[in-house]
Amino acid sequence: MVQIITQDPSFLVNEHLDIGQKNWDEPDHLAVSQLSMVNLFRTVAIEPGEHVMPLPKGNPLDVNALTFADPLMPTRTVNGDTFLNRRLFNDGLLVMHKGQVIHESYRNGMNEHDRHVIHSCTKSMCSMIAAMAVDEGLLDPSASMSDYIPEFKLILAWQGVTVQHVWDMQAGLVFSEDYSDPNAEYWSYARAAGYYPPLKGESAIGARAWAIENLNKRNYKPGTSFVYNSTLSNVLGMALENVYDKPLAELFEEKLYKKTGAQSAGYFNADPQGFPITEGQFNLRLQDFARVASLMLNKGKNFLGEQVLPSQFVEQVIQSNPQAQLAYGKDWKDRVFKNAHYKNKFWVLEPEKKRFTMLGIHGQFAWYDLNRDLMIVGVGSYPKQDGDLMMTVLKSLWHGIALATDTNTDSQP
């Protein structure tokens, strides 16, 4: 039984400035609200294991002193400090190269003890548990999703939708996550899950009920088009609860978090009914985010060499996948990473270079360059949820640091 941190949220982050549930994601509020999600949601603690696994330290890399091309003014460059503060609006950054931390820094008011919401990077962590369920024979990627969630058997749109379709966001269901469109289905879902106050005539019915009541129309044949749909990650979480016959928060704690050597509890925000919002509401200290994320860098092993994820999972994510690339390009127009695809809730950005990432709105990420044995983890308060400019800034950061590590050879263990 996980510990409840917040049973009845106040819905206030800063009473004096009137920052709360109605306006937490306004650009000038993000720096504090993303560290304060316990005030906005029901929240449970995901406890670490008995033994903390120290993060090895290597030869420091001064990212603030690096020079980056300025995405806003391409003929100019800016130093790392300006780039992180004024282009990326970064809150915390950690770089791990060849098994050692070579950079860790905080800004924008955040410190090493703060827990920052990692938004859709939570999806990738849910995916890790799904991989364990497949490895244990409890979840079949080729089986119908309705085999694991009986409520979907009665919904015509779910016929032919497999676990893998949901895992890869190729379910073919009608859904828009266009944050600029107030009529997009995403906003109805977000209010139902407790992100914002319900509109007149609505109620916060929770993530489960919203999925069952609203994911009932199809506009693509399953497996033919990638359409980003956060609610599908909640659906995957629902299936995991059913196959393990355990609450999702307990699965995160027992099967994943306790095995990573984390130092402090993670906080999982839940909807009003108590279901953990697995599409985006895990809150972690930066170092603990890196400990979980490093499983993908270390072929599924933790820092003690223990196999936590199935050994083949990382390769399944990053291997060349023409079908996923074709589906990615059908509905989704990625102008920054044109040859990318989405697999098992990871963004495979440059598959030929073994570069992929977890990615969350407002600048949360864990980016990998396996050829360099490199991982860059960040949390941020980018003013918009996403967009080409944010991705261009992130790409410049990742590639700039990658090149800098080539000369930081003393970081080798």
Image: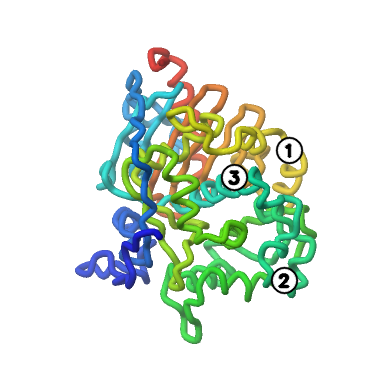
**Residue mark closest to the camera, 2 vs 3:** 3
Q: Disc 2 on helix, strand or loop?
A: loop
- Mark seen at residue 321: 1
Q: Residue 68 appears at what percent x and percent y?
A: 42, 29
Q: Disc 1 on helix, strand or loop?
A: loop
In this image, 315 relative to 66: left or right?
A: right
**In the depicted structure, whether residue 109 falls above or below residue 103:** below
Residue at image location 26% in from the left, 43% down from the top? 111
Q: Outermost residue toward the left?
A: 16
Q: Earlier in the sequence, mark 2 or mark 3?
A: 3
Residue at image location 79% in from the left, 61% down from the top? 160
**In the depicted structure, whether residue 41 falls above or below residue 378:** below
Name the residue tied to disc 3. 132
How many C-alpha atoms fall within 10 Å of the one at disc 2: few (<14), some, or many (≥20)?
some
Measure how far apart labels 3 and 1 are at the Cα level. 21 Å
The answer, for residue 86, to whether it is visible in the render is no
Measure how far apart labels 2 and 3 are at the Cα level. 30 Å
Q: Mark 2 belongs to which amino acid?
A: Lys
**In the depicted structure, whether residue 85 falls above or below residue 102:** below
Nearest to the observer: residue 210 or residue 137: 137
How many C-alpha atoms fall within 10 Å of the one at disc 1: few (<14), some, or many (≥20)?
some
Q: Mark 1 belongs to which amino acid?
A: Asn
Name the residue tied to disc 2. 217
Q: Residue 137 appears at what percent x and percent y?
A: 68, 48
Residue at image location 38% in from the left, 13% down from the top? 410
Q: Earlier in the sequence, mark 1 or mark 2?
A: 2
Q: Classify the position of the N terminus by image quarter.
A: bottom left
Q: Mark 3 belongs to which amino acid?
A: Met
Residue at image location 66% in from the left, 42% down from the top? 341
Measure how far apart labels 1 and 2 are at the Cα level. 27 Å
**Residue mark closest to the camera, 3 vs 1:** 3
Nearest to the observer: residue 66 or residue 121: 121
